[in-house]
Image: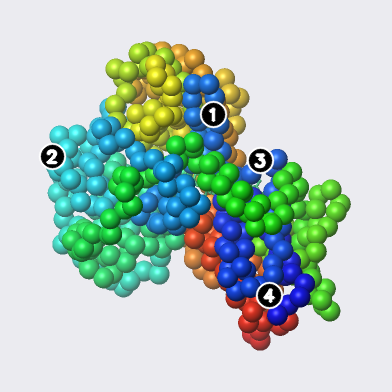
Amino acid sequence: MRKTPYQVVIVGGGISGLATAYALTEEGAKTQTPVQCTVIEREPRWGGKILTHVTNNYLIEGGPDSFLTSKPWALDLCRTLGLQDQLIATNPQHNQTFSFCRGALRELPQGLLAFRPRRVDTLVSSGLLSWGGMLRMAAERFWPKQNPWPADESLGEFFRRRFGAEAFEYLIEPLVAGIYAGDADELSIESTFPRFRELEREHGSVIKGMRKALASPPSPPRPSGEAASMFMSLRGGLSELIRSLMEALRTRGVRLMAGVECHEIQSPTLESGVFHVMLEDGNRLSADAVVLATPAYQTARLLRAYRPEIASLLDGIPYASTATISMGYPAESIASQIRGFGFVVPRKEQRPLLAATWTSLKWPDRSRAGETLIRCYIGGRGRETVVEQDDNSLMECVREELLSMVGITAAPTYTEVHRWRQGMPQYVLGHRDRLAKVQKQLAHSPGLYVTGAGLYGIGIPDCIREGTKVGKQLLQDYADNPAKKIPEA
Ligand SMILES: Cc1cc2nc3c(=O)[nH]c(=O)nc-3n(C[C@H](O)[C@H](O)[C@H](O)COP(=O)(O)OP(=O)(O)OC[C@H]3O[C@@H](n4cnc5c(N)ncnc54)[C@H](O)[C@@H]3O)c2cc1C
């Protein structure tokens, strides 16, 4: 057994980097490998895109507001950290979402993304689709499978081909491309929603495949007190997850260095295989292994001198900029205008607003009694200039949108803007091949790892899954190859 601890430096203190450190230290303890882990974060604040701000009247999420429960990694981590009593589900009594289309808010059928609308009458009465559009959508069950099978397709191509242009543009696009704040004609189906493609391949139809999957035995019951909900959050906001992770990491002896920016990674020395992690302040850290849990374009910058091939591959991953604008109102001033969880805006409508969430209706405890919090989401791929406006212009733009779409005339009594420049990675066509090439290149740099939302999944659960995988893999690689010999090509 190694006497001196294995030195690992993780760059990036978002959920990906912290999940990596958590898995690494857990695995180290399990396998009795002495590991000294250091995490460095450029900002004075930990959590990256996860940012909760609590004011006197409101709990505001500047970035993500929830995580998907069908991907279990975030929920599992919350339970492991003892946060199960803090989990909150969306309010079932307001469970309606709308789409702004052809000048009005129209209700989206529940269960739409499972292609099993629970209320088909909602789809009919909403006026979202023409009769022709609905018939074309229903015909998906009988629509022939693609032949020959394409290597990849854009989201737009895939969903138009299966469900018709109208269903795609008004129903599906704002939900699927909206998650990425992306352009559906650029995003790859294989890298964003591979399951839909699998369903076509296996069952000849997405609808048939979904129905078969949903007919299979239900998943095991949840621990008592946890309501079933497609999305969940934490009572004190998602930053509670970061706070708990940090506490656990401190207890495990992880060195946590905030306000420290990494400048570049220098090649490991031939004799010792030790990396030099160069810091902006001129200092350096030595490491046996380095994990870069930064946005892909930052990872590229850090690797430019040491591994230019990997840097240029990562440079090719585009990012979109967005902003969230949270607005607080006296409840009675907007109560009659808001209903459900909020609404999405199809790209076809060509509006600056991507979506609006009625936060106080969607989640418990997000505003004090007598106050209502809402959150607007703007920007996205190809519509980034709006994000660059100053706060006043941004607010004016959003208020005009809310007036014309929902009829809200009241002025907010509280506002808060969070800009996310280059915040949303875009998994465009070719993303999967790009990642395969990155992995191939990484095989020539034992001890170097990359993770983060720019690679294998943008959602919080995906970031936790990938960080966990890297943390475990790192120790496995060390056990298999302590001398870090480069495998032959
Ligand atoms: C507005 C918005 C809404 C979202 N909504 C949801 C949602 O509801 N549900 C969901 O699951 N996901 C959502 N997401 C996506 C999700 O929040 C992110 O993909 C995820 O949090 C990214 O985590 P990460 O650790 O990979 O990256 P980041 O959070 O970006 O963390 C990377 C960290 O690296 C640091 N860093 C960068 N360069 C350096 C350097 N040179 N040296 C040191 N540190 C450095 C950064 O400061 C940052 O803290 C949303 C994202 C945004 C922007």
Q: Amino acid at mark 2?
A: Asp
Q: Nearer the viewer, mark 3 or mark 4?
A: 3
Find residue 196 and report its horizontal and vertical position in percent: 31, 60
Find residue 130 and report its horizontal and vertical position in percent: 18, 40
Earlier residue among tags 1 and 2? 1
Q: What residue is at 58 percent from the left and 44 percent from the top?
A: 243
Q: Nearer the viewer, mark 1 or mark 2?
A: 1
Question: Secondary structure beneath disc 1?
Answer: strand
**Residue 446 - label:** 4
**Residue 121 - label:** 2
Q: Amino acid at mark 4?
A: Pro
**Residue 31 - label:** none
Kindly tell me whether mark 3's CB lies below 8 Å from ligand 1: yes
Q: What is the distance, in whole Å, between disc 1 and disc 2 at their CAs?
A: 41 Å
Earlier residue among tags 3 and 4? 3
Q: What is the distance, in whole Å, between disc 3 and disc 4 at their CAs?
A: 31 Å
Q: What is the distance, in whole Å, between disc 2 and disc 4 at their CAs?
A: 57 Å
Q: What residue is at 46 percent from the left and 20 percent from the top?
A: 328
Direction right: furthest residue: 282
Q: Nearer the viewer, mark 3 or mark 2?
A: 3
